[in-house]
Image (tube, rainbow, N blue to C red):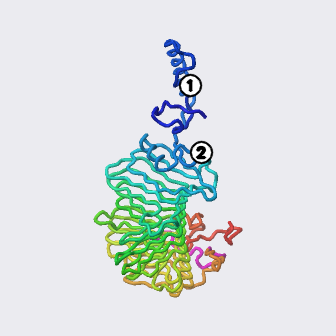
Amino acid sequence: MERTRTAFRDAPDSLYQHTGVPDMCLRDLPGTEHFFARWLSRSSCFALACAALVATPVAHAYITAGPDGTYSTIQDAVDAAIAHGGDEVRVERCIALCSLLQSVSIVDSTSPITLSGGWSTDFQSQPAGYYTHLLGYINILVGKYVHGGHVSVSRFFLDGSGFEATNAPGFKVLLAGETTTEVELFANTIYGFQAQGSTDGGAGLWLLAADSMTISAHDNSIQGNTYSGTDNGHVYGAGAYLRADGGTIEFSSNTVINNTLSNSNGGGCHGGGVYATTLIGSIQKGTITLRNNQYSGNAQLFCTSGATGDAAELRASGAGKIFVYDEKWTANNVPNNPGVYEVFIQSQSGSQLLAANGLITHGTWGGLFLSADASSKIYVSNFTVADNPAVGITAYGSGTEIWNTLLWNDGANLDLHDNAYVAYALNGPNPLFVDSANGNYRLSPGSPAYNAGSNVPTGGLRSTDLDGYPRPFAAVADIGAYEFHDRIFASGFD
């Protein structure tokens, strides 16, 4: 592949790599000292260039960074891409102990930027399983009145284990003001970041979507991040802090593992793994969707003023909406921390929260806490809540409705207050799980949950179950997160 300097004459020789016209067409041919000869040779080359451009489409430009790239730092490559109107930045993968000790900021770009790691030394392929190991963080900052395109970041292993008490999260996306920018973060690992402060959170991932802003974070691994409170302020979401301030956040197919929130200095804790909220000042109109995420080993420790959900706290307010589909929360928290639930959900000031197909098991105290004030709604359907030693579900408020939900082997299955409503629940009879001892909470043949639910729960029936199979499979929906199917390998190998 040859290079052309026609696109940007002031760019370094290897900055833009794509199919183009040979370099010889851009300089005098040897021996063409006569003006006419030079003109003829250039005219011929110009004609050749036009023909080549018509016959062969020019590939999208990209910039390279890394030991074998044009730029040694990712930041320099990103700055060049922004300066030239937005391009793809390919970052070389690191093998063995090769790590890049640097941090990156994408600031006020008005053009699409694609930043991806894991590239081969010739920047032509991204071998499966390879990332760029980055000892640093990535910030994406879009200011007021900046109208941008699409920004995507993928295939980085962000390693915060070398930092001590940094206040910078692994990924921070701050999109404020009247912006139409879309940001996508996918296939990254965010590991070992340590942050501290007051009335904040998100040591691993910190997202704010304002106005018409959209942020999508999917297929990432968020592991081993810690956030510590420094005073009597409350702290939020050690793994991920999601704040929809009028915008939209999609958080899907991520794993959230072993993140810890703590505050021994007088404050409280909210959401050890994830904190998601539309409760922001007077705006309160954002939308957050959490879908198909898995949580385990997340905890809230030494929280002086109390703690909420070890796996997650989800809080909707005002015109804000939160949707929760196909989530698995299991074995969050550590022993000897009483009074804390796996998942804490609250809706207030006229908001709505809709949750379906949830699995909550093996908390070290409670399973699910629900609370809706008189003007708000929480609709929960087809949850399986099991093996939580203190209580399965605690629910408050007449705006809280629980449908098609299965409870089993909790210390106390249901704890209802202030006219919280429950319909079509399986609460007491053995549901005949396939193998709950090994984490398989699907239904065996003959389960009393089979065909025992409602097809019209408030908030609607999901068309699929937690495995993605059609619901209902027979004429009537089953109770619980999983719909029974006549599958050959019902033990879970299907």
Residue type at numbered disc 2? Phe
Occupied quadrant, residue 281: bottom left
- Can you say which quadrant of the picture contains the N terminus? top right
The picture places residue 110, in percent across and down from the top left corner, at: 39, 45
Q: Is residue 26 visible?
A: yes
SS at mark 2?
loop
Residue toward you, 216 or 62: 62
Q: Is residue 40 magenta?
A: no
Side of 167 relative to 31 (left or right): left
**Magenta residues (range):** 442-458
The picture places residue 383, in percent across and down from the top left corner, at: 52, 74
Residue type at numbered disc 1? Met
- Circle 2 packing at 10 Å, graded few (<14), some (14-19), many (20+), is many
447 above or below 46?
below
Q: Is residue 446 visible?
A: no
Occupied quadrant, residue 267: bottom left
Residue toward you, 33 or 155: 33
Side of 288 relative to 468 (left or right): left
177 above or below 243?
above
The residue pinned by badge 2 equals 123
The residue pinned by badge 1 equals 24
- Can you say which quadrant of the picture contains the C terminus? bottom right
The picture places residue 393, in percent across and down from the top left corner, at: 47, 81
Picture disc at residue 382: none
Residue toward you, 279 or 466: 279
